[in-house]
Image (cartoon, grey):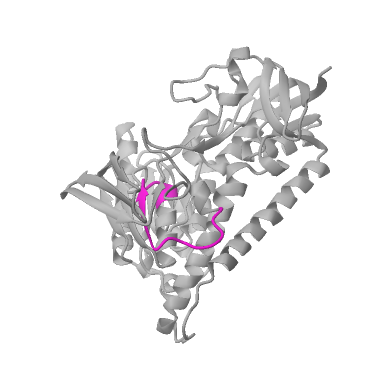
């Protein structure tokens, strides 16, 4: 006989465990199904994504600082790089957060089932438990939060040795490759390119589109390519890899690419596939429901994340949009608040910050000038460079800028785009300003402490109307 709950959630990532907590706060009984071995919650982000990646990038940043310390008057002698210790610290961070999430489930009385969840009926979920046996769970509501997994190109097999994915990078414990080719230059591709370069590897990025980080503002793409090339990272944009030419017969890999400079053969110790992710829905048995799925495997939902099946909701990577952990958590909260009759405000995609932790960092939200003009806005724009900010010079990171895009008619902020030191933190001010319908002038009116990097937000906002002070 099935055990009954107010809510059954399939998936323990941000789109699962965060709404589980919110549902509990709203008085709902909650069951959470997670298939990851060991029962570890937190999804891709905590286990093989955001958290271990950023732990590695923190080491990479510190290594770069040590190598360039003489400029600051610090002579540390020979700097040694101990990758096994790097991996040990990475895993310690992950494990501490895993324990934290598990504790939150107990605190909020969320029942966790470790196994693969699939629909038997629209409101009934079968759990094939990892340690053997089955359980059946029945819910007044079901939230699908099964997430995504690494994708690859047709004909390109990830063998986890010479051809690797991001999952392989964050679970490697012994060493880093001496050279690597990275296919793809989205957030994953450029973060690992930056990291491997700081770790001393020879890095080549291959991007089929005409610029790297192609979803960002074109000036951000150009600035990042300039910074990367200045660090010795080879960037091949507008270049297509010939998958059939892949040769793994030697000690490393060889692959032919064709781009602006014609055809050439690239060689490296490893090939990292960073071409995106795909939804993880195959095990759900959605045929037992009326849930609709697009040709790309995206579950179709409305603004409150309701599927075509009454009482069944979906959130996170499975519904497309921005495949970001912080977006997933907010989507899940909106879903459970709607279930509970709380009348939540739908999530505006233009207020979701997009952050990339390469060096220099990238952050953005909302529309670029080109996108805004395509939508019919009359646009005004302000841009301010970090080299005019005292704190950026003090920290030795004077390159990059913040750009503010606004509606000339209403003065409302349409988007912000930034590249430079700690912009992944600074962008939150712009998101909040957009949320409360603030204007660039109001950001400029807010007093920003001096000397801080945050002054760049004020100056960029003032620059929208030509009122920037220090440039």
The answer to whether residue 104 is left or right of residue 147 is right
**Image height check: is 246 above or below 97?**
above
Whether 445 is among the magenta residues is no
Residue nearest the observer in this picture, 362 or 245:
245
**For the view shown, which residue lies furthest in the left direction?**
262
**Image height check: is 448 above or below 279?**
below
The answer to whether residue 333 is left or right of residue 302 is right
Q: Quadrant of the N terminus?
A: top right
Is there any visible trace of residue 452 in the rendered image? no
Residue drawn at (81%, 40%), measured in percent from left and top? 108
Image location of residue 426, percent across then percent down: 50, 57
**Image height check: is 356 above or below 367?**
below
Image location of residue 72, percent across then percent down: 44, 83
Residue nearest the observer in this picture, 227 or 273:
273
Residue nearest the observer in this picture, 365 or 373:
365
Residue drawn at (48%, 79%), measured in percent from left and top? 79
Where is residue 19, by image quadrant?
A: top right
What residue range appears in magenta?
A: 171-189
Residue drawn at (41%, 60%), measured in percent from left and top? 194
Residue drawn at (20%, 45%), measured in percent from left and top? 259
**For the view shown, which residue lies furthest in the front direction?**
249
Where is residue 158, by image quadrant?
A: top left
Is there any visible trace of residue 264 in the rendered image? yes
């Amino acid at each position: 006989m099935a055990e009954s709950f107010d809510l059954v959630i399939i998936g323990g990532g941000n789109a699962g465990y965060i709404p589980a907590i919110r549902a509990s706060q709203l008085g709902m009984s909650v069951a959470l199904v997670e298939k990851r071995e060991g029962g570890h919650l937190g999804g891709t982000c905590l286990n093989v994504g955001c958290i271990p990646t950023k732990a590695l990038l923190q080491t990479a940043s510190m290594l770069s600082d040590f190598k360039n310390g003489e400029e600051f008057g610090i002579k540390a002698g020979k700097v040694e790089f101990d990758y096994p210790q790097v991996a040990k610290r990475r895993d310690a961070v992950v494990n501490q957060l895993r324990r934290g999430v598990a504790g939150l489930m107990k605190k909020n009385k969320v029942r966790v089932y470790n196994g693969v969840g699939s629909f038997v009926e629209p409101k009934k979920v079968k759990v094939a438990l990892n340690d053997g046996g089955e359980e059946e769970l029945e819910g007044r509501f079901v939230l699908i939060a099964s997430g995504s997994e690494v994708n690859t190109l047709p004909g390109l097999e990830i063998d986890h040795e010479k051809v690797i994915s991001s999952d392989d990078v964050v679970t490697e414990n012994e060493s880093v490759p001496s050279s690597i080719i990275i296919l793809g230059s989205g957030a994953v591709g450029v973060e690992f390119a930056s990291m491997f370069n700081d770790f001393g590897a020879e890095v080549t990025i291959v991007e089929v589109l005409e610029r790297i980080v192609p979803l960002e503002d074109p000036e951000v793409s150009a600035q990042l390519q300039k910074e990367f090339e200045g660090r010795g990272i080879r960037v091949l944009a507008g270049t297509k890899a010939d998958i059939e030419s892949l040769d793994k017969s030697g000690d490393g890999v060889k692959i032919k690419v064709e781009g602006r400079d014609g055809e050439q053969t690239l060689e490296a110790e490893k090939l990292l596939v960073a071409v995106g992710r795909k939804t993880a829905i195959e095990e759900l048995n959605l045929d037992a429901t009326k849930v609709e799925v697009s040709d790309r495997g995206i579950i179709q939902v409305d603004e409150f994340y309701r599927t075509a099946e009454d009482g069944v909701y979906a959130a996170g990577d499975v519904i497309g949009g921005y495949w970001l952990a912080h977006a997933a958590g907010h989507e899940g909260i909106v879903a459970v608040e709607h279930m509970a009759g709380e009348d939540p405000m739908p999530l505006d995609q233009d207020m979701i910050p997009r952050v990339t932790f390469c060096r220099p960092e990238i952050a953005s939200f909302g529309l670029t000038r080109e996108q805004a003009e395509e939508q019919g806005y009359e646009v005004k724009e302000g841009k301010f460079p970090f080299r005019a900010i005292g704190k950026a010079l003090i920290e030795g990171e004077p390159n990059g800028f913040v750009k503010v895009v606004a509606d000339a008619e209403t003065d409302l902020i349409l988007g912000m785009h930034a590249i430079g030191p700690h912009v992944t933190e600074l962008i939150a001010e712009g998101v909040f300003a957009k949320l409360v319908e603030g204007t660039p002038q109001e950001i400029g009116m807010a007093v920003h402490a001096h000397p801080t990097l945050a002054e760049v937000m004020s100056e960029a906002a003032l620059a929208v109307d030509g009122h920037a002070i220090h440039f």
